[in-house]
Amino acid sequence: MKAYEIQGSFGMENLKCVERTDPAPGHGQVLVRMKAVSLNYRDLMMVRGHYNPRQPLPLVPCSDGVGEVVAVGEGVQRVGVGDRVATVFSQTWISGRPTAEKLSGTLGGPIDGTLSEMMVLDAEGVIPLPKDLSDVEGATLPCAALTAWSAMAELGDVSAGDTVLVQGTGGVSIFALQFALMLGARVIATSSNDAKLDRLRSMGAWATVNYADDPQWGKTVRR
């Protein structure tokens, strides 16, 4: 199979397409043929060596993806051959609060990520994808969308009538805006770009602030 590896040292010039031996699933594992991979800012920082300069190489980058299960190992019941699945970013964080140990199995560093034709993953490390989501759509969800959902619905306990501040226009912020609106909150959004603020208003932001034009934007938001 083909895979992209960061080889030797960090930098885009060291991201190489290589041949690897086709993997096979073991007990409790699934073999996934990748169909779509999304790019997070984290992935770019990882390739450049800014995210974890001590990351051992070679490394297959990218944190999120969607594929089709093509084989299952002994004992696997929750998914089957032919299922479309999204990868779970943290393969070793299945439940409970995060710990250093649970976060030691994140895709795209420290363990190999999704930028390969095939992947062997733990059966608990994939999620069946709803039929109404395309492969590309599903591949954008695990990191950014789940981070935003956790902030809004789990940790933040946002409910109707709350006011939520969303900073910037990155993937997490855009998902947070949509989730907050879905939960009935009103959203104040910030950016340094007026065109992006226009987009945020078109998406439902109640108010927007250009923090480049307003050094006291924190006080403005509180008012």
Image (cartoon, rainbow, N blue to C red):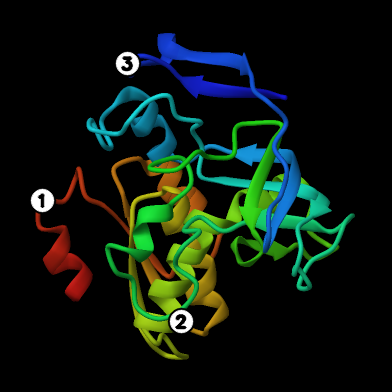
Which of the image's four quarters has the C terminus?
A: bottom left
Q: Quadrant of residue 96?
A: bottom left
Query: Residues at badges 3 and 1 in contact (C-beta under 8 Å)?
Result: no
Which of the image's four quarters has the N terminus?
A: top right
Q: Residue at x 42, y 90 (%)?
A: 161
Relative image position of residue 217 (x, y in whole percent): 16, 59
Which is more toward the observer, 174 or 193?
174
Q: Is residue 65 left or right of residue 108?
A: right
Name the residue carrying label 2: 153
Which is more toward the observer, 195 or 111?
111
Q: Residue furthest right?
A: 82
Q: How far apart are the alpha carbons under marks 1 and 2?
A: 30 Å
Name the residue carrying label 1: 215
Relative image position of residue 17 (x, y in whole percent): 60, 15
Residue 186 appears in the figure: no
Residue 165 appears in the figure: yes
Q: How far apart are the alpha carbons under marks 3 and 1?
A: 40 Å
Which is more toward the observer, 170 or 138?
138
**Marks 1, 2: nearer the viewer:** 2
Above or below — where is 128 with respect to 151? above
Name the residue carrying label 3: 9
Mark 3 or 1, nearer chain start? 3
Mark 1 or 2, nearer chain start? 2
Q: Residue at x 25, y 31 (%)?
A: 50
Q: Is residue 67 left or right of residue 143?
A: right
Q: Secondary structure at mark 2?
A: helix
Residue 139, label in figure: none
Q: Residue at x 42, y 54 (%)?
A: 105
Above or below — where is 52 with respect to 139? above
Above or below — where is 103 with respect to 156? above
